[in-house]
Image (cartoon, rainbow, N blue to C red):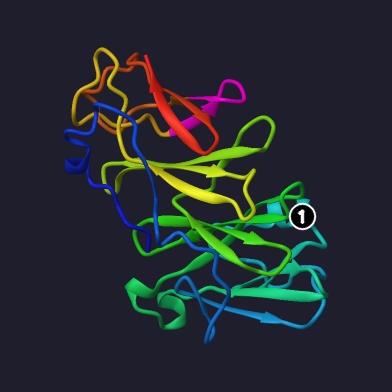
Amino acid sequence: MRRLWPVVAAVGLVAATAQAQDPAKEWALPASGLLHGSKATIETQPCCGPSRNARVNNPDSAALAKWSGAAARDGRTLLLKLAGNRTLKLTDCDDQSGCEADGTRVHRLVDWWPQHRLYVVLVGLYEESAAYLVSERDGRTLVATAPPVLSPSGRQAVALVSNLMSGVDLEIIDLSRNPPTATKVTAMPDCSGAGPNSFLRPIPVWTDETHVTFEGESPLPEDKPNTKQLLRVEGGKGQWQC
């Protein structure tokens, strides 16, 4: 499960925007049937035919239909096509299949990025969620805090969780690197009106190739809705701007 940034961690972090590469954010292959805690295997067999038994909770049928031939579902198993005529299988594990709460992993396809040869998979955990970026080349997988939002050029992306349960967890994904890297933004904006315990509004929106603003309602009702939240992103790094 991803590390959380609780509300109290935001206190005192408003002076500057610092970034840190999370050492746990590593590209990994399945080992002993597991991948970042998920039940996963890579098999030497072609993928992907029509989905079967695809009636699951929170279905990903629209994404599977859009990327037919690259991904499919066989009941509670998500199939992703890999290079070399291979298939990555991600199998759901929850209370219906006998898993304990802390072992919950439910996998739903969100998107396929052809320009990067990456699948984006939403991973439902017991009380929260994360996302996998899965390389079509070899099945290596990186954990992101949420399904990332691509910049207009697709060279970078941001992933955000901002809610009262998890606090604020913001990442910059640098897709110009090989492999891409995920870097935490560990400070909050300090523009006029922002308090030390403020939250980011939950919807990141790229206004151009290097700027992200945050829209929607803040998880904290007392946050001022017009407080400026503008992040400049370049070269895998971010800086808050007022």
Could you say whether the residue bearing mark 1 is in a helix, strand or loop? Answer: helix
Where residue 35 appears, as percent x and y from the top left, is 52, 74
Q: Is residue 158 above or below residue 223?
A: below
Residue 69 in which image quadrant: bottom right
Q: Magenta span has 210?
A: yes
For label 1, the crowd category at 10 Å Cα-Cα, with few meaning under 14, some 14 to 19 and many 20 or more, is some
In this rendering, position of residue 129 left or right of residue 89: left
Where residue 188 appears, as percent x and y from the top left, is 30, 30
Q: Is residue 20 above or below residue 104?
A: above
In this rendering, position of residue 55 left or right of residue 9: right
Where residue 215 appears, as percent x and y from the top left, is 44, 25
Q: Magenta span has 144?
A: no
The quadrant of the picture occupied by the C terminus is top left
Where residue 122 appears, as percent x and y from the top left, is 53, 56
| Nearer to the camera, 164 or 12 | 12
Q: Is residue 158 above or below residue 24?
A: above
Residue 75 visible in image: no
Circle 1: residue type: Ala
Prevailing secondary structure class for the magenta stretch in the rendered image: strand
The quadrant of the picture occupied by the N terminus is bottom left
Residue 81 in which image quadrant: bottom right
Residue of label 1: 65
| Nearer to the camera, 155 or 57 | 155
In the rendered structure, which segment of residues is drawn in magenta? 203-212
Furthest-bottom residue in view?
Answer: 32
| Nearer to the camera, 211 or 108 | 211
Residue 165 visible in image: yes
> Which residue does the image show at 53% across and 51% down from the upper left?
181
> Which residue does the image show at 29% across and 32% down from the upper left?
199
Residue 229 in which image quadrant: top left
